[in-house]
Amino acid sequence: MRKRLSLLAVLLLSMGWVFAQQKTVTGKVVDAQNQPVPFASVKIRSSKAGVSADADGKFIIKAKVGDFLVISSTGTSPAEVQVGSDNSIIVTLKGAKTSLDEVVVTALGVAKSRNRVAYAAQTISGADVSDNRTFDIAQSMSGKIAGAQISQSNTIGGSTNVILRGYKSITGDNQALFVIDGTPVNNNNTNTTTQMTGGGGYDYGSPISDLNPDDIASITVLKSAAATALYGSRASNGVILITTRKGSNGLNVVVNTAVKKGWYDKSTFPKYQYQYGAGYAAQYGVGTSDPFQPYFYSYTGKQGLGPLVPTTEDASYGAAFDPTLMVYQWDAIDPTSPYYQTERPWVAAKNGPATYLESPVSNSQSILITNSNANGSYKFGYTRDNENGILPNSNEQKSIFTFGATYNLLKNLQVGGEANYYDLPTIGRYGTGYSGQDQPNPMMEFREWWEMNVDMKELKDAYFRTANMPIEGNTTWNWGNPSQVSKPAYWDNPYFWRYQSYESDNRKRLIGNVNAKWDATSWLTFTGRVSLDQYHWLQEERTNTASVAVSKYTKFTDDFYERNVDLMANLHKNISNAFNLSALVGANLRRSEDATTSATTNGGLALPGVWSLANSAANPEAAIETDQIREINGLYASATLTYNDFLTLDGSLRRDVSSTLPKGNNVYYYPSIALGFVFSKLLPDLTWLSYGKLSANFAEVGADAPVYSVYDTYKILTPYTGNPVGSLQTTKNNALLKPERTKSPEADLELAFLNNRLGLTASYYSEKTIDEIIAVTISASTGYNYQYQNAGSMQNKGLELSLTGTPVKTRDIQWDIRVNWSRNRNTVLELYKDASGAEAKDLQIGAFPFGPSLNAPLHGAYGQIRGSDFIYTNGKPTVDATGAYKKTPDENEPIGSTQPDWIGGINNSLRVKDFTLSFLVDWRKGSSIFSLDQDFGQYDGLYPNTAGNNANGKPKRSALSDGGGVILPGVTADGKANTQYIDASYAGSAYGFGAAPDKNFVYDGSFVKLREVILSYSLPKKLLASTKSIKGVQLSLIGHNLWIIHKNLPMADPEAGTSFGNISGFQSGAYPSVREASVNLKVNF
Amino acid sequence: MKIFNRTLLIAPILVLLLSGCTKDLTKLNNDPKNPTNISYNALFTRAQFRLSFLLNNADYDYNPQNFFEQYWQETTYLNESQYDILYRGIPDLDWNVLYLDVLANLVRSDSLAKLQITDAGTLASVHAQIDITEVQAFYYLVTTYGNVPYTDAFKIASTNFPRYDDAMTIYKDLLRRLTADIAALNGGGDGVGSADQVYGGDNTSWTKYANSMLLRMGILLADVDNATAQAAVEAAAPHVFTSNADNAYFSYTTSPPYVNPIYGFMTLGSRFEDFDACSTFITQLLSNSDPRLPLYFTTQSDTQTTYSGLPPGVGGGYFGNSNPNPTLIAADFRGDFLDYAEVEFYLAEAAARGYNVNGTADAFYKNGVEASILQWGGSQADADAYYAQVSVNYTSATGTWQQRIGTQAWIALYNRAWDAWTETRRLGYPVLPAPTHAVSTFPYRFTYPVTETNVNSVNVAAAATAIGGDLRTTKLFFVKQ
């Protein structure tokens, strides 16, 4: 009764406690290596009263002098210590395991023993994300976490998408929340909708990539709602908890230095035809007296009147190459060219587009100093990563300054703080998607609009030859007027883009916190923390005056600020010999502010190359501003009751008040309940079973609305000669919004066999979001395109398996395998319905350029690609009487799905004495990609299938009357195989858009990639024994993205083209994947 | 020490909880950058600008009629030249401009005016000018799509699934509204004032403009409801434009954003190379030595004096064919809503049909031809010489009055492809050759937007049935079947 009373007292935050006559002993449990042993049981032998050590091995117990303390932990024999005059003791448990498996960091940083965790939580080590030296934590997790779909773009500093257990929200960004030592880290993305849906733009990347991999001790991924409910709505897509390195006993210095070389993967770059050059068709000079029609214009140069290449065009459906034919090329027009007014043989270029790609060398260095003693601990760190991209003039630098310290102010009061400063200047991000000349994507040119007679090296020479002339190097193959120096028809010189029309940006960021931890009693701890995440991000985009596009300078700034105040009381107590209770109550105050300003010049630049808003030719339009503020106040409590360390009941409740919902509807609760049963404890006779746990949990999570979705506003536009101009917004807000809900049941099974040599974890989940707050598409005749509604319901059901094994384990040789596998099945259960039962059948998530769109179809799976399809007969594409494909009359047919069938990763680590070889194979099965590159590239006649001979041995591109043409694979309306030749003599006649529906360019996005290979050698300890200062030396050879073992998408990387958010399944101007090899030296002092 | 500890603990908790409980977080829902109120005329300007954007465009994303009418052709991306309007989702884009950018802002402008204007006379003329612009937008909706949401439109408080109304019923209501608006314009004052970029709100000009619209809208029904057509035309005829000085031009500025959309697309978007003149139109202009040829187009190249165009549906080089004349690509080139030449052709038709419009078809036709040449910068001598030709003169040109008026209206409505398309569909002239690789026969309407079929599927399906199928070849209510 007294214990119950005291429990009650604690919950009421009462300070009364008993046992006054005893003395307080503080202690720490460590293993043979002096590393803390968490959660050891500490009992007084005589009274059986006891406590548990915390995650750091520390404990506080009331005892009398002479008492014997019995300290025990899983898998060890107990140790005994007698309490003497000392008030602090250190207990060494020999043979104790400190493997990560034994401790699980759960929500709010609460470490629990594995036995007491009743939901899925997968942990990887800091080495998993730092040893590969990619300096992108999110990317480095790919293939290492079951149920995490991590996709990366191939651009420098590009976005990484981290989706746990499928897309839960129809219109949200679905990104997992990263929390570093209790501080949530902002991962807001500034990419435009146009960029994300495959239009033009730069991929400004995910701010989560700022984090320093070298400062990470471990990462725990909490996937289920029950595990994350304490974080509130922002954790609705799962949480990735990062624990940074802490100072442990004594001074420790780790230095890393690496050099990296990158080169593009040829299997992800176009293969071209080399038989035909510039032009769309036999159509130039037709109807005139031009002597060189229909493939050439005419020009008089040094060799007299001769054929002139149609440089106004950007396709390779022109004249067949013929080395005996002398023609005036684009460079014959360039007065600075050695070939000025000079004819050259009509042949395919020696140096194709691949010549443009560089093989950059990058380097990185880092140092981390940690130290601790009885008074506290500290760490200092500096990391610098200098990455060069495969495009000319691309570079990304990261400088990270780390400082953290703790100090024991009083015996039981620890204060600490941490500050990380990040400076991330980037220059020359790659233009992506179907871009314009103002955010240029050279790959779009190389994959979609190119002339095979154009020599890249000559273009490079032309750029540098004329860079200081008034045309700023824009001497291009694509003259608008082929017979004179003129503004380009469509395309600037690709080197002009990189050096004259480039972007740059710089993010300066501070993430830090101050905290205090007070061990009020042996079983009650109070923690307070104020944390901050703040950055200023400047983005500048440029287009110089010689461009075919209107010259421009755009300046965008994003000022982000988030402050969290947390206060938490943790209770940790053995109520009786059998029952242990750990509980917490807390409060969280969160405020975030995000202000952006975008200003751009108007009507071009007055002076070339002056990147200033004042250099605007016309008065600049007003800057576009946004200012978003959100506050959420949360109160939470949770309790975990454990019986005999094998049966755990866990419950939690959080209450949030959010600023983004209307009054009266802005309070919501998140209950969760979980039950865990370590059945192996009851089966001690099954010696082959090392561990067995079954758990089940359920949580209901709420979420608030996007900022400013309650009240209607007007949009203010540029005044028209002094008259105000404004507009309704395209989205109708909703003053009746209520919180959305996600219901998530989950069941987990965790097994280990043969002394933990073999382990299996399986999770099954079924998450259902209801009342989802989405801006539903509505008929524009309502006056709006979208309306915020509590509409929509989506379900994700899935299975995650992870398997660990150690097939070989001797003193000198150890082989470890980790396998992760997951599948997720998504169903859109409901979109939007009104009271009369009228119902929306589809919600378009994004419209890609040129036809296809990505959709959430009612009763179907999220991420359906729609476009035009074939008309099928007996399952085969049907052709009409002329031999051409028949197409659906609309562009709204399902032609693919971006949902993978399953994803997985296999990681092998083989250690032989001082050598360790590890390699990771990353696997995705299924998911469709629409390739605009293939659609347009085939239309343009760039690819080998559009040239060569037909079945009759005649050139396909010859006229039908000359035996040319092709038979498209398919059947006639009566089901017979197609035998009709169609004309293939001009762009779009037989290949590419126009000739085939969108469906023809939908490919299977499956891949098997050798993601990582790391071979490292550690200098034998014996060798180092002589030098007192050096504790360890490790030399590593690292390969990244070395080999795409299997893929079905031709000429491109199935992962390329991904931006931030929910849009995938589209490629335009996809970048090749970059193979990287690096050498890293790590020295531990 | 314990006191210190307790204070340390309790104080922040109290501060935290008190601050969390007292503050009204919902105040943060007020967006500091976007106002909750606005003046009615700010919305009017936006609506008028977007209407002009749609009607005076060259972008193949919005204006395929330019290719249907074979004024221009696409050099490289031939979809629209071959009648494919779905590739770029044109029905969705144009529908959104009309409903969202134009009508939604006008409807709201109208309701705000009632709150913001106290003087009854001013309010009457403001309402009339807003309503006339609404009628204009609905005119394009029904003549482009057929049945569209009308009664249920802009009633988001009651339905998000608007039903479609019968196009003819809508059309008659538009005629009724327009007639009422004309009466209301007598109030004097300057209506929406400087918010109007066409007439600065001048009621006298608006009266002529609204009557000219009534003339156009009346004549549209001549083949299907002659009585209604005749009544509207005869009511309007005495009050319509009488010279090019009356023309309804939206005035653009020389720097973005208020620039002519042709400049916006071709110059700012650098898409010059995507268009050539169409050979059909060039041949027509050449056949009568039309003085507008050099005003409409460039020569084949800087060094040549000849003109040529691409055959319909066939690609070709930008270089070596005639291109749109730089005058109409100027940033501040007029946005033409309705002009005097066009009015004269409607009157000519009315006279030819025997309506009482106080003149002969011959005279109106001649005025129309002359007005067009002068409007484009030709001289009176040019006009006289042109009209003197047997193939042009109303009395001697070949064909029915439909053919003669249709052909000259087509030439005059260059750069006005929305209206030219309506005339071609209505009169059946000019007869335009089928483009190579056309995906259908001549388009008589736009199909309904994909968005409507996805989100308002029941109502759009009913509308499709009612009009005879959601096809681009379905003939709309005003076309004699």
Image: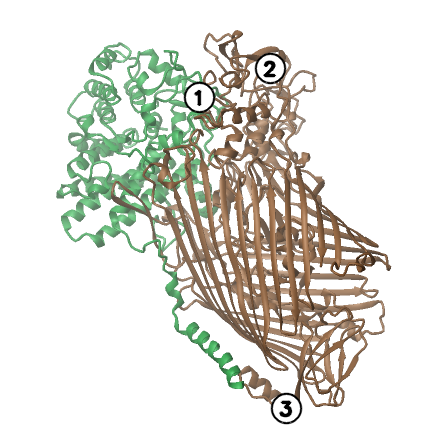
Residue B460 at what x, y percent from top left? Answer: 43, 43
**According to the image, label 1 marks what residue?**
A486
Q: Which mark is residue A836?
A: none
What x and y, as percent, mark residue B238? Answer: 15, 30
Q: Is residue A395 above or below residue A445?
A: below
Q: Answer yes or no: do the residues labelled 1 and 3 have beta carbons within 8 Å? A: no
Say if mark 1 contacts mark 2, CB within 8 Å.
no
Q: Colour of chain A?
A: brown
- The quarter of the picture where the C terminus of chain B appears is top left
State which mark lies toward you, 1 or 2: 1
Q: Nearer the viewer, residue B213 or B330?
A: B330
Mark 3: secondary structure = loop
Mark 1 or mark 2: whose residue is earlier in sequence: 2
Q: Which chain is green?
A: B
Q: According to the image, label 3 marks what residue?
A: A19
Q: Is residue A533 left or right of residue B255?
A: right
Q: Position of residue B390 (x, y in %)?
A: 26, 9
